[in-house]
Amino acid sequence: MSSATEEKKRASSSRDVNTPANAPFGGRLLLDESAVFEQNAWDHATWGEEQEQHARDQIERQSKDPVPEELKETYHTEAADYWNKFYAKNENKFFKDRHWLRIEFPELFQMIEKDAGEKNVMEIGCGAGNTMFPLLIESKNPKLFVYACDFSSTAVDVVKSNAEYDPNRGKAFVWDLAGDDIPPEVEPESMDVLVLIFVISALHPDKWEQAMNNLYKLLKPGGLIVFRDYGRYDMAQLRFKKNRLLSDNFYVRGDGTRVYFFDSNEIVKLFGSKFTIEQNAVDRRLIVNRLRKVKMYRVWLQGKFRKPLAGQEPGAPAATTVETTGDAREGQEAGEDAEVAMVDTVLSLETPLDSPATSGTATPAETLS
Ligand SMILES: C[S@@+](CC[C@H](N)C(=O)[O-])C[C@H]1O[C@@H](n2cnc3c(N)ncnc32)[C@H](O)[C@@H]1O
């Protein structure tokens, strides 16, 4: 099939027809390359060989000047301190209402329905509580309890100082996801949904396995993990300069916080041995700075992983689904490197904030890093 035919097929199978004037999120398909600077964001961005090569070249460049060996250990041993400093500096500027949560993770919002019954949700690596608070604010379920934890005590303080924090409906506490055991604050196998948004990328790869063990212990049989994180070759990865590479695809930002960029096959390996993979998607988005004629390719991964019921094996992981969801409307999160944030700030100032064209970009408040 020719690529033009493929594109047309994708366009017609998409939820929505691409008419720039009314194109909804997820339906903004770039069918004519010459139109690229006509709007600010395109979903389902395709990558050509030239771009792949550019990405490989950037990785090659970075590998020539990694973080000096003698500095690496500090970034690992003092990881929580770097996040403390991050939250001390930014306070709660990173709290934002993520509308895409409702679209991408409806399972999470089933928990807040009036008759949902007793439900426990836990936001891990909660930062400012970007999932906890929307849930608590919207919940009609008197039996919902939301836990929020982070290994940064400053982040936990930020959550506790939020006016919406209510100890009768939720609890925030310090916990290291890669620690030896689940936190004493919660019972084993008591969680209905675990939320992992831009947090697994902050762990050292050596800690992934222990994190998986803890997640497994926390979840009820049949419980669900919802996951969103950085994808391989995301713009934020390719822009890292000298002395930022810690190990393959793992970097330290200018503020000392660490970030890994996942390939979706790694997600299968990581979650697939314990959980049934219900979704493993790649969200590729092309963000355009029309003024400066700059193209920025963002790549995020999104997944849903279910703990098998007692006595069942995890379902054979579905072959990696390489698809785009396109509905997650903002990708910026706490810790995004300043350079990317700056570009996005420029972008967001170009068009009114409520314009659909600005989706995929951050609001200025989100980019004050
Ligand atoms: C990129 S931020 C994301 C914050 C939040 N989930 C969001 O999306 O806004 C990563 C968060 O993970 C936390 N974190 C990193 N390593 C952790 C660990 N081992 N255990 C618990 N939290 C961790 C950091 O302190 C930080 O708040």
Image (cartoon, rainbow, N blue to C red):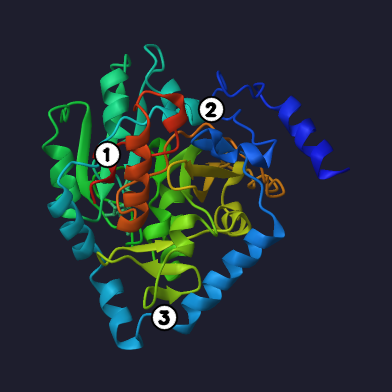
User: Could you say where residue 294 lies in the image, as x and y percent from the top left?
Assistant: 48, 50
Residue of label 3 = 66
Whether 231 is drawn above or below 126: the answer is: below
**Identity of the residue drawn at 17% across and 41% down:** 92
Do the numbered discs 2 and 1 sit on residues whose CB atoms are within 8 Å? no
Residue of label 1 = 364
Numbered badge on residue 25: 2
Q: Is residue 184 left or right of residue 222?
A: left
Q: Secondary structure at mark 1?
A: helix
**Identity of the residue drawn at 63% across and 59% down:** 51
The mark nearer the N terminus, 3 or 1, is 3
Residue type beneath disc 1:
Pro
**Identity of the residue drawn at 72% across and 29% down:** 11
- Select label 2 or label 1 by which is in front: 1
Image-quadrant location for residue 254 = bottom left
- Select label 3 or label 1 by which is in front: 1
Mark 3: give few (<14), some (14-19) or many (20+) Cα within 10 Å. some
Mark 2: give few (<14), some (14-19) or many (20+) Cα within 10 Å. many
Do the numbered discs 2 and 3 sit on residues whose CB atoms are within 8 Å? no
Q: CA distance from mark 2 to mark 1?
A: 20 Å
In the foreground, 25 or 42: 42
User: Could you say where residue 250 lies in the image, as x and y percent from the top left?
Assistant: 44, 68
Do the numbered discs 3 and 1 sit on residues whose CB atoms are within 8 Å? no
